[in-house]
Amino acid sequence: MFIPVLAMHIPDGFLSIPVSALGWLLLIGIVAIALRQTRQQLGDRQIPLMGILAAFVFAAQMINFPVAGGTSGHLLGGTLVAILLGPWAAVLVMTSVIAVQGMLFQDGGLLAIGFNATNMGVIAAFVGYAAYALVGRVMRGRPGRHLIGAAVGAWLGVEVAALATALELAFSNTASLDIALPAMAGVHALIGIGEALITVAALAFIQQTRPDLIRGSEASASRGSGWIAVGLLIALAITLVSPLADPNPDGLERVAEDQGFIETAQQPPYEILPDYTVPFIESEAASTILAGVIGVIFVVGVSYATARLSKKRRGASGSQPI
Amino acid sequence: MQFNVKDRPSMGDTPLHALDPRMKLVVAVLLIVGIVLTPERALPAYPLLWALVASLAVIGRVGVWRLARLGTVALPFALAGLTLLFTTPGQPLATVGGLTISDAGLLRFVSILIKSWLATQVSILLSLTTPFTDLLGALESLGIPQTLVLITSFLYRYVFTLNDEADRLRQARASRSAAPTYGRGGGRWWWRAQVAGGMIGNLFLRSTERSERVYAAMLARGFSGQMRAIAPPPLTWRAALPGLLPLLGLIVIEVLARLWWNG
Amino acid sequence: MSEMLIQVQGLYYHYPDGTAALEDVSFTIHRGEKVGLIGPNGAGKSTLLLHLNGILRSSSGQITIDGLPLTERSLRQIRAQVGLVFQNPDDQLFSTYVHQDVAFGPLHMGLPDAEVERRVEQALEAVGMRGAAGRISFHLSGGEKKRIAIATVLSMQPKILILDEPSSGLDPRGRRSLIQLLASFTDQTLLISTHDMRLAYDLCSRVIVLDEGKIAADGPAADLLTDAILMERHGLESVGHV
């Protein structure tokens, strides 16, 4: 049967109704724009191309590779598609993939499709694409810039999507942020490395076989400064909101004091947002952000090294298909 | 790793299979909404909700226990909610490794587990009793943009074809993945990730080329950007009526849950 | 109504990278004729077929279908008259259900629903696949897919049926039954591109040999296909005398 690709497909029951509704609203708005944009970009080709690429992402997610301890790595794909076809196309492709996973495989819930597609589609596509475009600009003219950009983008896309997932759970009051956030961030910092490696290797293969496709994507990435701003804004917003939105800032200590809390506080029928306080930025917040920065630097280094290595290897052995 | 959705029995002649897919989708979503909205302390509501889901499973001849078992697919995700045991304010119940479990935390955690399990069963029941294309048709009638629905139907059409191609790539990889007599073969994990990435790049190129051919095949048969299909029959009250029964059950349970069991 | 169904006059085509794919291709196909188009890989056969219903547009040359010149304006009319069956049925059958695919052409011709249903039934009947409407395309066998692919075009009731490599990927039995099926279309004008010389010999009265984008020979199938020297020169195999 289907093996869940990542611990990022939120099932039903884990998002509150208001949070689910917000996810749907966000998704509907963004998909509406994406439909118009890709229609302009692709014309009548839109439907067959997006549809078959959605099938591609679905099939590609099932190409796994063993990592350590019986676990295996997979591609998520949002950033890869965003780099190859632009972020709007990636939004549609990923939304379609996640909808099918939810409706047919119960990999993620039905009500949760809104935020699942927002996390793994919209956020992964825009943040990843922005990082890709930014690296391409910073390293203008240097060899390997788009592979490094893709590595950074793929890693960051996964990481920010994971942070968003933790946030949504916390706002639904189904996970406590001060534990879920570092846990999600930590696990996905590793998963993101797998995503980065696969994305880079896939792009390298495409570059060798069809360099015209990569050139086209680079050209469009270098044009859109807006993307960089939008994507980095999303990333920044989520990273900064995360440590601030803790609904139970000092949960453990408060347990003892709050005996009788349940008796006095009548639960409102629908909690629009669970009560959250805005504490001063604790050292944990700073360390989360710092960890992100260190992670980015690490991934840039690793991917630059692998890009160089694989180039040397190919140079020595000719262009052998893998 | 195979996904065998094509073997799933989404065809059948039970009243659940026969219910109009538009109605079925709406009912399923409302059931899930109802389940999620159940107050967490209304404990008697949970067995009743399960009885509601189970009776639907009986009507659809899906098998109550089978559905219950399939419904656990999402439970590993509950790891994310495990922390609630310790962080939710309430009466201390027990201490595990220096962490205190509160009664409210336990209640919240268990209620999330049950709700997720029930909601997942509803979603599985829907997919087991409705052919996927009918579901797509229902989505379109309910206002999901046609283009997105069509993209998804292309996904459904070609996912098996592309998965077969991926399988051939996997076999080619496996047949060349030899290991020395002693020791472990297959290279380092980052090298394996690169191999997988190469396969994915290969698959991407095949997919875009296929999309060009499919597009040409569509053009050849008169496609000009606007997709046409035979209009689905209008939804009549007679066809929709049976779908109201489970909703009635849901309403009764939810009212009880809010009025009497929410104390 | 003209007896000359397809007229191709001085057709040239260059790939985007500049290589010539078709050079000064001219021929005429009459109503009811069964023509084989043969030539080595890369000769331009598929490129030529894609021109005949306007999927590829040439840099110069004139194509006329049943007296109607192919232009941007006549494109949709011409696509209804020229039925193109692609080589890989998985490209042709892009819908989930057989019915959706066979109905696609008639629906996009703007026919009313009742007429569409009638044509779907007729087309499935004609390819010997009655009752397959509710089946899922992915589950069909290779031979069945081929038949349905032909039905998706027959339902448009085209004046000419064009098939690209119809026997590729079929086992001997599937190939035999396909040849029988095509032979049963007695009144239908056919243009078949193929590497299967035996199939061309069995079905076609005339063949056109295309090589390096140019027409190398055009004549009765019985003469050309048994001409060992001609066939050899263009990387083909002659059919032994029967």
Image: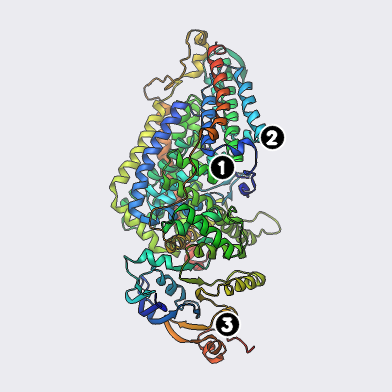
Q: Nearer the viewer, mark 3 or mark 1?
A: 3
Find disc 3 in the rendering and name its residue. Answer: C201
Question: Label 2: how many residues lie within 10 Å, few (<14), some (14-19) or many (20+)?
Answer: some
Chain letter behind tag 2:
B
Identify residue for label 2.
B63
- CA neighbours of label 1 inside 10 A, class few (<14), some (14 to 19), many (20+): many
Residue under pointer 1: A104
Say which amino acid is labelled 1: Leu
Viewer-closest of A56 and C177: C177
Secondary structure at numbered mark 3: helix
Is residue C169 shown to the viewer in this render? yes
* C-beta proximity under 8 Å, tags 2 and 3: no
Q: Depth check: C186 or A23 in front?
A: C186
B254 sits left or right of A114 in the view: right
- Please say whether residue A11 is visible from this viewpoint: no
How far apart marks 2 and 1 lie (CA) works out to 18 Å
* Residue C214 horizontal/vertical position (percent): 41, 83
User: Which quarter of the figure has residue B246?
Assistant: top right
**Label number found at residue A50:** none
Tag count? 3
Query: What distance separates the C-alpha of mark 3 from that of mark 1?
Result: 49 Å
B155 versus C70 height, above or below:
above
- Asked which quadrant contains residue B219, the reply is bottom left
Residue at (62, 43) in percent of width and height: B10
On the image, the x and y values in percent for residue A200 come to: 46, 54
For mark 1, name the chain: A
Hey, what amino acid is under mark 2?
A: Gly
